[in-house]
Every structure is written in C-alpha cells, then in structure tokens.
Image (cartoon, helix red, strand yellow):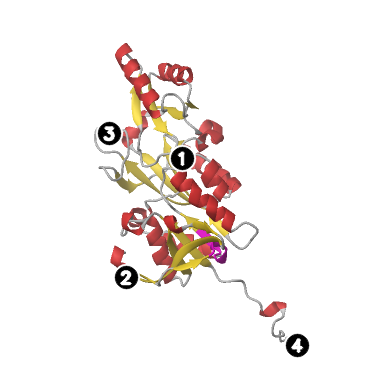
Amino acid sequence: MRRTPQRGGPESRSKPRAKLLWVTDPWETLDHSKDTTLRLIEESLRLGVESHWTDVRSIRATEGGILLDARRVTTVAPGRSSSAFAMDAPIATSPALYTSIIYRTDPPVDLAYLHPLQLLALGIRGTRRTKIVNPAEVLALRGEKIEAMSLGTLCPRGVASSRPEDLESFGRRMSRAVLKPLHEAQSKGVELLDWTTRARAQQARARLEALSHGFTQPVLLQEYREEILDGETRAWFLDGKLLAAVRKHPRSGEFRIDMDRGGTLGPAKLTTLEKLALPRIGKHLRSLGIRLAAVDLIGGLVTDFNHTSPGLLTPMEKIVGRNLAEPIIRALAR
C-alpha cells in the first residue's frame, strides 16, 4: 500500500533551487559577445536556472552587514551584445542568499581583486548553503603561475624568487628563460630573456629588476620550451574532469600567445604526454576544490593554471562543436 506523505513532512520537502550570482568586472568593460561568464548566464536561463549579476565594485561592508547590488537576469537575446541582456533593477542584498557565487573578475590578482573577495567570504561566513566558485582560499592563495610547481615532474623547470642571485643563476643555466609576473594573466608582462652574451645578460638583469620592483617582489623564471612555436594546449576542466581541449597558436614570429593580438585557436589532438598528464591535473584540481579551471600545457608540461577566470569558452564551443556551457551550469545548479 502506497503511503501518502503528510504535508510538511520530510518527504514533501524539496532541495532548495539553485540561485547563482555572477560577479564580474564593470559591465561596460566586458567583451559581451565573447565573454565566458555571459555565455554561462545565457545557458543558465535556457536551462531554467535563476541567475543574478553584480559589478564587483558594488560589494561593500555596511552597518547592516555585507551587501551587494544584484540584478536578476530575465532574458538574453541572440548575439549576447551589451543590449541583449534584460535585467531587473538592482537590489541591495546579502551574498548569503545565493547557492553559488561565481567570482569571475579578471586578473591581475591585486588588492582590487582580493578585497571584494574577502568581503564576500565574510558575508557568507557561518552558512553552509552558499559556496564561492572557485573557493575563496584558492583564489586568494594559489598563484596561477606557480601552482604547477605542486605537480612535480609535470612542471617545467623554473624558479620563483625576488633574489637576483637565484634568478640570474637559473637564467645562466638555461641560457634563455621566460619571465612571468606572478599576478598577471593573458601574457601580460611575459618576456623571453637571454643570457648568451654579456650585453643580453645585462638587459635580462634590468628586466628582472624592473618586473620585481627592485628585487622586492618574487617573479617567475621558467625554462623556455621550443614547442611553444607550434602552440600550446588549452584544457578546460569541470570538477576535475576534462571538458574540452583546443590548441592555441601564437602569432607568427611570437612566443607569447595573446588572443587579442593575433593568437588563434584550433582543434587539439592530444599527445601521449598530455593524455598521461590530464588525470594527474584533474586529481590535483579536485583536491583543492577547484570546480572551473583552464590549464595550459606545452610539450605535455603545465605552464599555467587559470582558475581565477578561465575563459575562451565561446570560441572553444565553435571549434569542438559542442555546448560546453550546459554541463557547467548543470554542475553548478546541483
């Protein structure tokens, strides 16, 4: 005999519906049609998942607690132009009212990035219902340029230091090495330094001194991999599982890959080394609770993690011929 559940009893309760909050840079600064966050918001509406958007600048601490100005997204017209998004009027609300807060302001990871994140973390303290994606402690403490060092043999040789003797010793051993600031993204500040002649070594020291602010802030020197001239693999991960991979190619004559300055994307055929590396990378991401990440590999080695604001989802969908946003939204809504 089938038992009819009593009103208000345990069997009549349903799990709370997902309520997503997307935090981005100011609206006018976004590349709306290509922006990964806005593509995900569009997909959330298609799947019936409630989504709200806020400008990172609206996050604040007041006498009433931590507040932000959230706008519920109601419709997204095809093309995702700036005017394609219809939203309700902004409402001052608590971050603790959302199931997931997807913090996707772009690097650099400076004080303008960290302070709003700290306020959000304070605003959800004590609640189990609200999660920041990716975890706030990861966004604040796990540097994207140096996280690969946690992977041992999957990381290219390198040194992160503010001491000139460390940096120059490594540079002389390598003859050439790639200089990377630790807080930047999209190849900003990346340079190829050369120690093959006295004059070039002097130039390298000058660049090291400048980028380390007088040898007071650590920078990364990483071995130069010739394979970069044939491109690098961008692997997108969702909850530690490979979602899709594409190949990023530099502009002719360049070793940096800047997608805004001549870099291109194409299909990826994973190498044996990459296939061996991906499960280890996924396991590492899961151990840190990183739900969304893009990882760049050169010659089967991890050169960069992208867990602050992994992008390129829109062009990747076109290349692989699949809806990549749908599994992401379904995972966030669970």
Is 267 left, or right, of 288 in this rendering? left
Q: Amino acid at mark 1?
A: Glu
**Is residue 214 shown in magenta?**
no
Question: Closer to us: mark 2 or mark 4?
Answer: 2
Image quarter for residue 170? top left
Q: Image quadrant of residue 321?
A: bottom left
- Numbered range of the magenta stretch: 94-101
Q: Marks 2 and 1: which is nearer the front?
A: 2
Q: Nearer the viewer, mark 4 or mark 3?
A: 3
Q: Is residue 271 above or below residue 52?
A: above
Where residue 250 is drawn, which disc sits there? none
Is residue 100 magenta-colored?
A: yes
Q: Determine which residue is flagged by label 1.
A: 274
Q: Amino acid at mark 3?
A: Glu
Q: Position of residue 270 (x, y in %)?
A: 42, 43
68 or 99: nearer the viewer: 68
- Mark 1 residue crowding within 10 angstroms, few (<14) / some (14–19) / many (20+): some
Earlier residue among tags 2 and 1: 2
Q: Say if residue 89 shows up in the picture.
A: yes
Q: Nearer the viewer, mark 2 or mark 3?
A: 2
Query: In this figure, which residue is indicated by the disc labeled 2?
Result: 77
Secondary element at tag 2: loop
* Residue shown at the point (57%, 45%) measured from the top left: 283
Above or below for 171 versus 3? above
Q: Distance between the Cα atoms at labels 2 and 3? A: 38 Å
Which is more N-terminal, label 4 or label 2?
Answer: 4
Residue 86 pos. (x, y %): 35, 71
For label 2, the crowd category at 10 Å Cα-Cα, with few meaning under 14, some 14 to 19 and many 20 or more, is: few
